[in-house]
Image: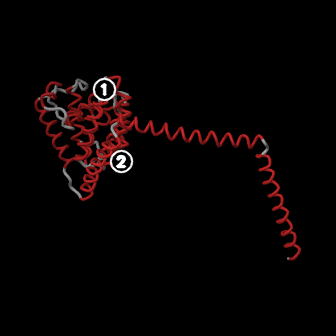
Amino acid sequence: DGFKDYEINMDSIQTILANTQSKGTTLDDVNAALDEMNTYSDKTIYNFSQMAKNVSKFTAAGIDLDTSVSSIKGLANVSALMGVKNEEAQRSMFQLSQAMGSGVVKLKDWISVENAGLSGEAFNNALVQTGQALGELTKMPVGSTFKDWTDQNGSFRDSLESGWLTTEVLTTTLGALAGDLDAVQLSDMGFSDEQVTQMVELGQTALASATDVKTATQLYQTLKETMGSGWAKTIQTVIGNFTEAKGLFTNLNNFFGGFMQRSSDARNKLLAEWKWFGGRTVLFEGFTRGLNAIQIVLGAIGSAFREAF
């Protein structure tokens, strides 16, 4: 598990760097972000390697690194709050990463969230409040409740076709639920005092749901994740970080690859001369004669069998 986490970490660094370097992200930034994610996963019931993959998908959708990490943590917290299993949560993260690349989450994208069990009144209410604060729900009066809004606009899912659930609305909500946005930041964004209190409390409840171990299976998963992360650090110390490992394995590849290439060249050269001198022709002539001989013998046996019976 430790070696697997280490290799996924290396792959994730490569993908994240490729997607975020244009925004000024450095290797140190990526390492710090993944360390933050690893620390989070050790405290929760969620798997670091899967979360790192999803961070890569979010950055590939054009979302900056810090927002991607915060969004993945927020989705994990929501999943724990709703009692969603890890595998289903990972699938919904993948679906949302694709939708966020287009800038808007529509109903067809939200269906996957509903199927995973992530859509509930608490999460939907938080999204609506964020949409109001960021000016995407201009028709919703300040201080309106989620029930007031649904009474006026119909079901939450049907309202998504209007395009109000933008990438910014979703990532801001997830950042709050991850605990990465405090009361001052939320207030500066336009949330009312009551909304700020609700968002902070919901974030604390969601984080507690992700960190509180409630079953033997969750205990096993958490301990396994902690042990895997520890061994991943050990392997990184021995083999090296991203830069060191790249140098090590590139040199090993050049050495063994060169050896194999020379061996292949020598073998193919020898076989080419063998073919040029008629070896291939003799080989297949021998096969043909052998098959003909077998056919003659089997034909004689068949004839004798028919005559006898």
Name the residue at 83% across, 58% down.
292
Residue 261 appears at what percent x and percent y?
A: 57, 39
| 141 and 62: which is toward the camera | 62
Figure quadrant of residue 14: top left
Tell me if mark 2 has few (under 14), some (14-19) or many (20+) residues whose alpha carbon lies within 10 angstroms of its own: some
Name the residue at 22% across, 33% down.
149
Residue 48 appears at what percent x and percent y?
A: 30, 44
Q: Amino acid at mark 2?
A: Phe
Q: Which residue is mark 2?
A: 3
Q: Work out whether 200 lies above or below 163.
A: below
Tell me if mark 1 has few (under 14), some (14-19) or many (20+) residues whose alpha carbon lies within 10 angstroms of its own: some
Residue 113 appears at what percent x and percent y?
A: 33, 41
Q: Amino acid at mark 1?
A: Thr
| 159 and 135: which is toward the camera | 135
Residue 229 appears at what percent x and percent y?
A: 28, 47
Q: Work out whether 233 lies above or below 307.
A: above
Helix, strand or loop under label 1 = loop
Q: Quadrant of the C terminus?
A: bottom right
Q: Is residue 114 visible?
A: no
Name the residue at 49% across, 36% down.
254
Q: How many marks?
A: 2
Colour scheme of the picture: secondary structure
Helix, strand or loop under label 2 = helix
The label on residue 145 is: none
Q: Which residue is mark 1?
A: 25
- Disc nearest the viewer among 1 and 2: 2
Does 113 sit left or right of 146 as displayed? right
> Of marks 1 and 2, which one's residue comes earlier in the chain?
2
